[in-house]
Amino acid sequence: MPDRTALSMEIAFGVAASQYPSQAFQTATADHGKEFACYKSLEAVHGVQVYFAYPYSSWQRGSNENANGLLREFFPKGTDFAQITAEALENALDSINNRPRKCLSWRTAHESFSEVLSHLA
């Protein structure tokens, strides 16, 4: 997203959602950032139920916090992502999504997501 506006969020979500079957995204948990001011539109247009975590309650967004930690293995806190190339970010995400995880019975996130998507198509 070029900025943290609601319009940028709507566009980014629309681009991501258009790449998957309509049932792939059923819920979203957000913080109280200004970019989520468009949540009613996301719910109406995409049929997604948006939930808001309480401030300072990171445990309510556990998978997001876990993903942040995995990303920090590649890009330490304080990294200016404007200086990171798309290729470097793509390589990091590819490594993360193809890493076997105990919580997924040693399958990768990519394998698990693909399996769920195969039932939606």
Image (cartoon, rainbow, N blue to C red):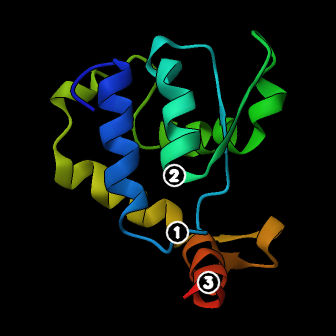
- The secondary element bearing badge 2 is classed as helix
Q: Nearer the viewer, mark 2 or mark 3?
A: 2
Please tell me which residue is depicted at 78% across the width and 72% down the height of the picture: 104
Please tell me which residue is depicted at 53% across the width and 14% down the height of the picture: 33
> How far from the left and from the top, in percent, is residue 67?
60, 45
The quadrant of the picture occupied by the C terminus is: bottom right
**Viewer-proximal residue, 72 or 44?**
44
**Residue marked by disc 2:** 46
**Residue marked by disc 3:** 120
- The secondary element bearing badge 3 is classed as helix
Please tell me which residue is depicted at 82% across the width and 30% down the height of the picture: 60
Q: Distance between the residues labelled 1 and 3?
A: 8 Å
**Viewer-proximal residue, 85 or 36?**
36
> How far from the left and from the top, in percent, is residue 98?
51, 73
Give the mark nearer the N terminus: 1 vs 2: 1
| Amino acid carrying mark 1 in the image | Ser
Please tell me which residue is depicted at 40% across the width and 16% down the height of the picture: 78
* Outermost residue, front side: 44
Give the mark nearer the N terminus: 2 vs 3: 2
**Residue marked by disc 1:** 22
Q: Please state if 77 lies on the left or on the right of 108 as rendered.
A: left
For the residues bearing labels 1 and 2, Cβ distance under 8 angstroms? yes
